[in-house]
Structure formats: C-alpha cells, structure tokens
Amino acid sequence: MKAVIEASEAVALGVKFSRVKVCPMYPITPSTHIPERISDYIFDGEMDAQMIHVESEHSAASAMIGSILSGARSFTATSSNGFELMYEMLPIISGMRLPAVMAVANRTVAGPINIWNDHSDAVSARDQGWIQLYAESSQECIDTIIQCYKIAEDKKVMLPAMLCLDGFALTHVFENVDIPEQKQVDSFLPAFKLEDTLDVKNPKSFGPIGFPDSFMNFKKQQHDAMANALEVISRANKDFEKEFGRSYGDGFVELTDMDDAEFAIIAMGTICGTAKAKVEELRKKGKKVGVIRLRSYRPFPIESIKNAVKNLKGLAVLDRHVSLGANAPLFTEVKAILPELSVFSYIAGIGGRDVTLQHFESVFDDLESGKQSREWLM
C-alpha cells in the first residue's frame, strides 16, 4: 500500500511492523512525533506493546536495558541535548551487547539554544559502539528501522543500532511511502529471542565489573562485532531487496552518477538530495560529477568508499558537524583512507543553516580548479 506520510510516522510504522514490545520514551523536539504515533497505535489496539513514560532521556535508555534483558524487543527515540543526557548509558548498552534500536532525529547540540538540524548529536557518539545508519527519505526510514533490528540482533553482531534522520528536514516531511505488509516483515525479521535473559528461576549477573585484565578484551570483542556488522548490513540490504524490491546502494553508500565521475561530493542525510539536484544540472552542461551518499557511518565502510572514488580526480567531504579545534570528523576519516586523492573539507548546514545549490556549485568549482576557496559554507 502506498500513502503520503510524515517521516516520523514512517519510523513509527517500522517499529510497529517490527513487533516491538516495549518503548521507553521521553519526547524531545524534533523526535516527538515518533512516540506520539506509536502511542496512537498502542491506544488503538494496532500494536501489542507497552510504552513506559519515564522522567528523562537517561531513564529511557536505562529502562531499555531492563526491557531487553527481560526478552522484549525495544525501541526509543530522542534528539540533541536529550541524546546527550542518554550519553552515560550508550556505552553501557553497547558493552552489554544489547540489540537496542533508537531513532535519533538529528538536531544541533546547544548552546546557544537551537532546535534545527545538523549531525552534532549522533556524530559526537560515533565511538560508543552503536551502529549508525543515516536515512535520506521517509521510505528509507521505515525500511531502515526494520533492517536495524535484523542487523543488531544477528548473533555475529549483537550491538545496538540507531537510525539517524535529519530533524525537521526529514522528520516533519511528508512523502509518498510504500508501506509493507506485516507478513512481509515477519518473513524478513524473525521473532526476537535473547539467549540470556533476566529469570528469577535461573539467576544471572549482567553488567558486572570489568577489571584491567579483562576490560580490553571486551572492547576488542565489540570492535570485532562492528567489523562483523559490515557483512550483516550488506546481507540485510540484499535480503531486504529480495523481499520488498528496494535497496540502498550496497547498504553502506548510495552512488549517483559515479560511473564516469571525475569529481564528487560525499555527505550524509538530506543534503545529498540538494547535491544530486546540482549534479543533474551540471551533467546537462557536460560536467562529470557525482554524489556519494554515506548511509553507514558506523561501521565505517572503508572498502565501499575506496571503490566509489577509485576513478576520481577530486573529492569534497561535507560535514554537518564540526570537531572544535580539529578537522571535521567525516573528512578526517575519509582523508585517512584516501591519502593519494585530493580531498577538500567543507563544514555546512550547522544549526540548520541552508545548504543551497549555489554552495554545491562552488564546491564543484573548487574541485575542478584544484583549489579550495573556503571551508565554511555560510
């Protein structure tokens, strides 16, 4: 069935179709519409689940630990400084190898106070052991939520996953969405079954202390699991295409006009749509340009990026986050794996600043000239 729905509702539908049982929630703009829609489904009897109304985002993440360990597939959503309030629990959830799934409505982290979109919340948590997949459309939101459970719950992974969607620029946008049938989702996503759960008849300890002689081993296991996630994400993307007829590149990057491109832009989220529009315009003028949309920021898909850029003369990296006092995060990682390629760094869209067609034209002009005119696109 096709319907015009908001991206936030697409996320909520993905949660419902995934047969989530527990949703600890503390709403924050612009993620608020997600728990609102889920609460509607529960109240109307469309979703057999329990919503826990907690007193903070920290409590939402904490409650999710207990709900997953009780054997319930669980979900929450947050944004910005609320996400920051969860921060203490992020490495604990990952360290306990719990396959939690969370939607992050990407919003800048204050201050000064700002409710608009950039990636400073999720990107700041890139090292906390969560898989991060960035969506560009409402369709991708519903599809990726379902895939997140498939990936996170795989025994080779057992790590939490977050769907990142741009605040307002996507969360509040209405688009035509192909809504799957429940039986299709059930065929793709098996019922949740955790091997070790809280059981009064069979007591177990969870989250014990890690002494210096063992803690590093746990971190190594998490690192290996993130590497395993590369294979699992790829397989989930392919299996999803077989079941639903849709895929997102190779699961890690989605390429536009890259077959013969000489210059390209790599970025995450909705600004890629603007980049594609500029590429379409420049292609009509004979320019060999393209776009690489990075879907998986963690795990970082080194081989996919290398394959995408192998014929390029120059690459521009657009970050919607700034690492104060250092290079931009995505640029740092891209440049590290492409030492021989000319790579320019651009900071764009911070705090909801518009990223325009003119900005992208100036970036492609820089690439073609081989000289970067500026770093901050303002």
Image (cartoon, grey):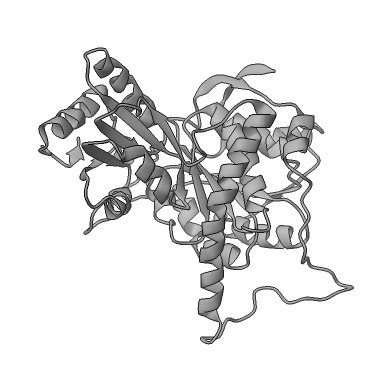
Observer-nearest of 338 and 375:
338
Q: Is residue 26 visible?
A: no
The count of marks equals 0
Kindly identify the residue that appears in the image at 64 percent across and 34 percent down: 240
Residue 82 higher or lower than 34, as above or below: below
Question: Quick one: quadrant of the C terminus?
Answer: top left
Q: Where is residue 147 in the image (x, y as percent from the top left)?
A: 62, 41
Observer-nearest of 148 and 227:
227
Which image quadrant for residue 258? top left
Which image quadrant for residue 357? top left
Q: Where is residue 276 in the image (x, y as percent from the top left)?
A: 35, 24
Residue 216 shown left or right of residue 177 in the figure: left
Pick out the residue farthest to the right: 201
Residue 155 higher or lower than 40, as above or below: below
Pick out the residue farthest to the top: 284
Q: Position of residue 22 (x, y in %)?
A: 73, 49
Q: Where is residue 217 in the image (x, y as percent from the top left)?
A: 54, 77
Residue 188 shown left or right of residue 88 in the figure: right
Residue 53 shown left or right of residue 308 in the figure: right
Residue 204 higher or lower than 68, as above or below: below
